[in-house]
Image: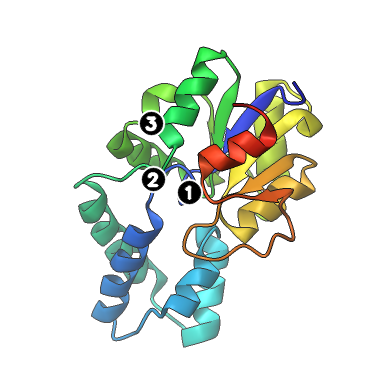
Amino acid sequence: MRYDAVIFDLDGTLIDTESQAFEAGKRAFDEMGLTLTEALFHQLVGRDVDSGYTLIRQWFGDVDRDRLEARWVAHAQTLQSQGIPIKPGARELIAHLEQLNWPKAICTSSQRDSARRKMGHSGLTAHFDLVITADDVEHRKPSPTPYLLTAARLDVRPDRVLVFEDSETGAEAAYRAGMTVVQVPDLVAASGQFAHHVAQDLMAGAQWAGIL
């Protein structure tokens, strides 16, 4: 096989949190007298919190970051506590990799507590021993640093890693790390600029990569 490990993004790739995040964001923005448009939200997808707020300030000027974040997180947690849907094919692909005893990990732009909470609500915790989050790196996606760190922790060469991503930001990070990138778009269409293959779903991407 041409791969020694598989790394997954979390939000929008393994779990369907993006639609919940948009709804939670709309509620939080409304409470502050602002409007979260789909256009702005699509630009936020895949970004870490700091770069996201830089973009929000470009749209709205000085915004009370702490208040907005608190309201957004509160609404997101309420929605997530009701359950987080798994993306099509995710459970089947994870089970297949576990049968093969392949190393696998998650590399996410979410902060550690948020990532662990979402994994718990979606039933993924038991399937991943290694989870690299925004708290683990100084330079976040689209920097290749998070993916390079994940490969190092797995003790595999970057060019022997297969990555599944949904966002342009995440795909760029993995591509710049020298990994093979399968992009499965969620809410935002993929340009394909940073993907070796754009797939309709995870299982189709795995078939293209030859791991099924």
Which residue occupies the foreground of this view, 171 or 192? Answer: 192
In the rendered image, residue 118, in percent from the top left (x then y), is placed at 35, 42
Q: Amino acid at mark 3?
A: Leu
Q: CA distance from mark 1 to mark 3?
A: 15 Å
Circle 3/circle 2 CB separation < 8 Å: no
Q: Amino acid at mark 1?
A: Ser
Q: Nearer the viewer, mark 3 or mark 2?
A: 3
Q: Is residue 42 left or right of residue 164?
A: left
Q: Earlier in the sequence, mark 3 or mark 2?
A: 2
Q: Residues within 10 Å of mark 1 (few under 14, many from 20)?
A: many
Please tell me which residue is depicted at 29% across the width and 57% down the height of the picture.
76
Q: Amino acid at mark 2?
A: Ser
Which residue occupies the foreground of this view, 186 or 114? Answer: 186
Which residue occupies the foreground of this view, 32 or 144? Answer: 144
Q: CA distance from mark 2 to mark 1?
A: 6 Å
In the rendered image, residue 192, in percent from the top left (x then y), is placed at 70, 59
Circle 2/circle 1 CB separation < 8 Å: yes
Q: Give the residue number, with chain letter if any, for mark 2.
A: 114
Circle 1/circle 3 CB separation < 8 Å: no
* Residue 107 visible in the picture: no
In the rendered image, residue 51, in percent from the top left (x then y), is placed at 57, 65
Which residue occupies the foreground of this view, 32 or 195? Answer: 195
Please tell me which residue is depicted at 78% across the width and 49% down the height of the picture.
176
Q: Give the residue number, with chain letter if any, for mark 1.
A: 110
The quadrant in which the C terminus is found is: top right
Q: Under tag 3, what secondary structure?
A: loop
* Residue 177 visible in the picture: yes
Q: Under tag 1, what secondary structure?
A: loop
In the rendered image, residue 105, in percent from the top left (x then y), is placed at 56, 29
Q: Is residue 158 left or right of residue 67?
A: right
Q: CA distance from mark 3 to mark 2?
A: 13 Å
